[in-house]
Image: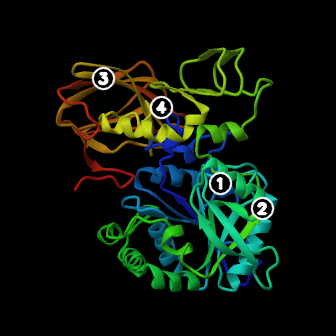
């Protein structure tokens, strides 16, 4: 394909708030199985498995999602990778600068293939052909973006106006202009003109050219990224950039920081079944539909209803006589909205935040590196949770200042540490963890361990944990 090695860079820091309530900040859309049994993140990684022309994948992601990322690599059998954890989200320019600085340590002549972790690509052959074409342009020093040939007058995307063809690379074009999201009339004119493409947010960036343009247009971001990488710390499978340096960088997109200013921008037009899955309406567009045009998932009964997206991840949905609607249920929330308002769901999530609620952050099922827990009941000074511990995993050795706990084994074998005692519990057996006791729960078996945990005390928040030892590096100072 090219004499320079191409390094996949996957940006995975987003919260996917437009797909709320299925997508939450702690478990966002890239980790959800939205259209198949595989998550969008898994599908993104699969594009690079077994390709000798590619370097090892580099993920720039959110600290809160670090174990979800690592577990996906393990599940796919990928054992050579880099995971860079942003101390806090700073948009795509600082994220790409981090990845570039890190890759430059090993391969200063690399080409970066940058893409979000939450996009769908239906035609992989077309994608690989576009990457090959983009690599030829990148070898000439171009900063390449991929433009999606528009199928409709879409107002939810930015656009790229293509200019003259790049000499020597047939099918690649100089960028004439980047255009913000248009109104409906303007979007229709772009579709008719034929020279405008959807901005996919996927790039091929040769390191040498990228560094030169950062130095020209945004030197501070690159300087801070280099410092953050140079002074990074290793933590299990993760690399943590120096926090102060990274947080000093501006929050800016790579489009605004570099691509809209550089004279080296080139666009490769491509039709590859692309969808950014940016809203429920987008998911409806691409999803399978019944004879009435409904996209249905889960426990749903629909009568005289058409062109809806009806998704049940909780209580069943019974719909009569509705059209062009979004109805999504989870165990704790129900969303009802016109499809036309799907881009405004982000405003609803902001209102939930402003009211001090937690539904924008967590599902009732909260995932942890050792397994998951789900709140099933709560009242004054008590709450009940169902814990599922993966085979061979154990929780941290910990204590609580404000609560005691009862553990009841529902399925599997639990190994319990309570102060100086270590003992096993089997199905229908239980134990008591007094307030202040050092304790640990472990699954020594080969099947998932199911525990009912009853907490009682004056404060039951998740931050009432003092960790003394932990397999996942979460020990308190």
Give the CA distance from mark 4 to mark 3.
20 Å
Q: Nearer the viewer, residue 77 or 63?
A: 63
Give the CA distance from mark 2 to mark 3.
59 Å
Mark sitting earlier along the chain (4/3): 3
Mark sitting earlier along the chain (2/3): 2
Give the CA distance from mark 1 to mark 2.
13 Å
Q: Give SS at disc 3.
A: strand
Give the CA distance from mark 1 to mark 4.
57 Å
Q: Is residue 56 above or below residue 296?
A: below
Kindly identify which numbered label has been placed on residue 449: 4
> Which residue is under mark 2?
194
Mark sitting earlier along the chain (3/1): 1
Q: Quadrant of the C terminus?
A: bottom left
The quarter of the picture where residue 319 lies is: top right
Q: Give percent across and percent down for residue 404.
A: 22, 28
Q: Is residue 405 above or below residue 240?
A: above
The quarter of the picture where residue 33 lies is: top right
């Amino acid at each position: 394909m090219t004499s320079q090695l191409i390094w996949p860079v996957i940006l995975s820091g987003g919260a996917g708030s437009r797909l709320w309530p299925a997508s939450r900040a702690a478990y966002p859309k890239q980790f959800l199985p939205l259209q198949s049994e595989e998550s969008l993140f898994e599908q993104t990684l699969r594009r690079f498995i077994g390709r000798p022309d590619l370097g090892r994948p580099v993920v720039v992601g959110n600290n809160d999602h670090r174990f979800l990322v690592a577990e996906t690599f393990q599940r796919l059998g990928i054992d050579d990778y880099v995971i860079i954890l942003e101390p806090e989200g700073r948009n795509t320019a600082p994220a790409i600068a981090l990845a570039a600085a890190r890759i430059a340590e090993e391969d200063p002549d690399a080409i970066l293939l940058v893409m979000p972790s939450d996009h769908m690509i239906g035609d992989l052959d077309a994608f690989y052909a576009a990457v090959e074409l983009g690599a030829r342009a990148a070898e000439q020093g171009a900063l390449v973006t991929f433009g999606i040939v528009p199928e409709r007058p879409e107002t939810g995307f930015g656009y790229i106006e293509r200019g003259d063809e790049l000499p020597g690379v047939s099918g690649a074009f100089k960028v004439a202009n980047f255009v913000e999201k248009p109104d409906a009339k303007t979007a229709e004119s772009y579709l008719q003109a034929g020279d405008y493409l959807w901005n996919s947010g996927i790039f091929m960036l040769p390191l040498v050219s990228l560094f030169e343009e950062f130095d020209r247009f945004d030197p501070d971001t690159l300087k801070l990224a280099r410092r953050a990488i140079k002074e990074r710390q290793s933590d299990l499978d993760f690399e943590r950039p120096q926090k102060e340096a990274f947080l000093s960088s501006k929050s800016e997109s790579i489009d605004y920081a570099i691509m809209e200013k550089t004279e080296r921008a080139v666009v490769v037009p491509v039709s590859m079944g692309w969808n950014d899955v940016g809203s429920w309406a987008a998911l409806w567009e691409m999803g399978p539909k019944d004879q009435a045009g409904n996209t249905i998932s889960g426990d749903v009964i629909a009568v005289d209803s058409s062109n809806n997206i009806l998704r049940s991840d909780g209580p069943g949905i019974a719909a009569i006589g509705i059209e062009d609607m979004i109805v999504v249920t989870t165990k704790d929330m129900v969303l009802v909205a016109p499809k036309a308002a799907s881009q405004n769901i982000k405003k609803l999530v902001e209102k939930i935040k402003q009211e001090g609620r937690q539904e924008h952050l967590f599902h009732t099922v909260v995932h942890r590196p050792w397994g998951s827990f789900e709140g099933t009941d709560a009242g004054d000074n008590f709450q009940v949770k169902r814990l599922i511990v993966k085979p061979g995993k154990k929780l941290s050795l910990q204590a609580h200042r404000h609560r005691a706990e009862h553990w009841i084994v529902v399925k599997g074998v639990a190994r319990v540490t309570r102060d100086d005692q270590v003992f096993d519990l089997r199905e229908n057996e239980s134990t008591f963890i007094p307030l202040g006791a050092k304790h640990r729960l472990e699954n020594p078996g080969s099947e998932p361990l199911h525990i009912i945990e009853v907490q009682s005390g004056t404060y039951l928040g998740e931050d009432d944990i003092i960790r003394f030892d932990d397999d996942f590096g979460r020990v308190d100072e």
